[in-house]
Amino acid sequence: MNYELISLTRDPEDARLAIITLKRSDVKNAINKAMVAELTRAFDALREAADTGCVIITGEGPDFAAGADIGALRERKALESLAAINSALFAKIENFPVPVITAIRGYALGGGCELTLACDIRIASETAQFGQPEVNLGIIPAAGGTQRLPRIVGLGRAKELVLTGAVIDAQEAYRIGLANKLVPDADLMQAARKMALTIIKKGPLAVRMAKAALNQSSRVGLDSGLAFESTAQAILFESDDKMKRMTDFLEKKKKG
């Protein structure tokens, strides 16, 4: 597929790792309709590719994504807002079968921050800055920000960030759990690739089931979540991959 506002490549060390780069660096990778459409096509294509084991999303240049295109937002009306195209994309990413890691440098604001919230793991460089400043513009984070942010950092901290519109640095994001890992800017993609390649080496069906089960923890009650977990485990116990990995483990242990 041809893309103009993003790129989709495969890692040279392991083609099961897909890397998506936002490429509107002249406007700090601001997310517009066209970029949303391209990201949607990219994730649909990756879903159809059975060999995809992990995805990294990052931004070209010094920033991840400094929110949405404000000029376009100013002209948006209620019906267009209710179409929720960003929400649909971010839900697609959150529910993507394999893990999605985001590598963040510079600004991750507004819709850019909400994009990171939809990903499974957030790796930040020391230059990263996070925020949901929508109240400064008379709107709210409405692409999942008011729902996902409290589940990641807790309700109190989420309220503080959203209601004040504050922008926080990478150290604070790491301290409150918004960033999973904090690394020097020069090491950002190396750190993201290392984590992604570690995940890819694990049981592929187990990783998919684990992500799905973990997602259930924030959506359903405990009883339903436990039922999903037990069903997923039962499926895995019948898999060839489980049998091979356990057999290999026992043989290595026997050899000492």
Image (spheres, grey):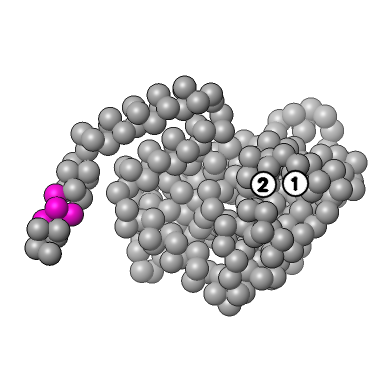
Q: Position of residue 86 (x, y in %)?
A: 67, 40
Label 1, on which residue? 157
Mark 2 to mark 1: distance in Å? 6 Å
Residue 184 placement (x, y as % from top left): 60, 75
Between residue 4 and residue 14, name the one nearer to us: 14
Q: Is 250 colored magenta in this rendering?
A: yes
- Viewer can see residue 179: yes
Give the residue displayed 69% in from the left and 51% down from the top: 113
* Residue at the far bottom in the pictured view: 186
Question: Is residue 86 shown to the viewer in this render?
Answer: no
* Foreground of the two, 210 or 98: 210
Q: Position of residue 45 (x, y in %)?
A: 45, 46
Secondary structure predominantly adopted by residues drawn in magenta? helix
**Identity of the residue drawn at 58% across and 77% down:** 186
Vertical side of 73 occupied by 222: above or below: above
* Residue visible at 74% across and 29% down in the picture: 82
For residue 5, side relative to residue 72 (left or right): left
Numbered label attached to residue 153: 2
Q: Position of residue 80 (x, y in %)?
A: 77, 32
Q: Residues within 10 Å of mark 2 (few under 14, many from 20)?
A: some
Q: Residues within 10 Å of mark 1 (few under 14, many from 20)?
A: some
The one nearer the camera, 165 or 90, is 165
Mark 2 belongs to which amino acid? Val
Region rendered in magenta:
247-251
Q: Secondary structure at mark 2?
A: helix
Image: 137 above or below 222:
below
Instruction: Look at the image and say whether residue 135 sits in the magenta stretch.
Output: no
Query: What amino acid type should be assigned to the residue bearing mark 1?
Result: Arg
Q: Is residue 207 left or right of residue 101?
A: left
**Of helix, strand and loop, which one carries label 1?**
helix
User: Do the CB atoms of the residues marked 2 and 1 lie less than 8 Å apart?
Assistant: yes
Picture quadrant of residue 145: top right
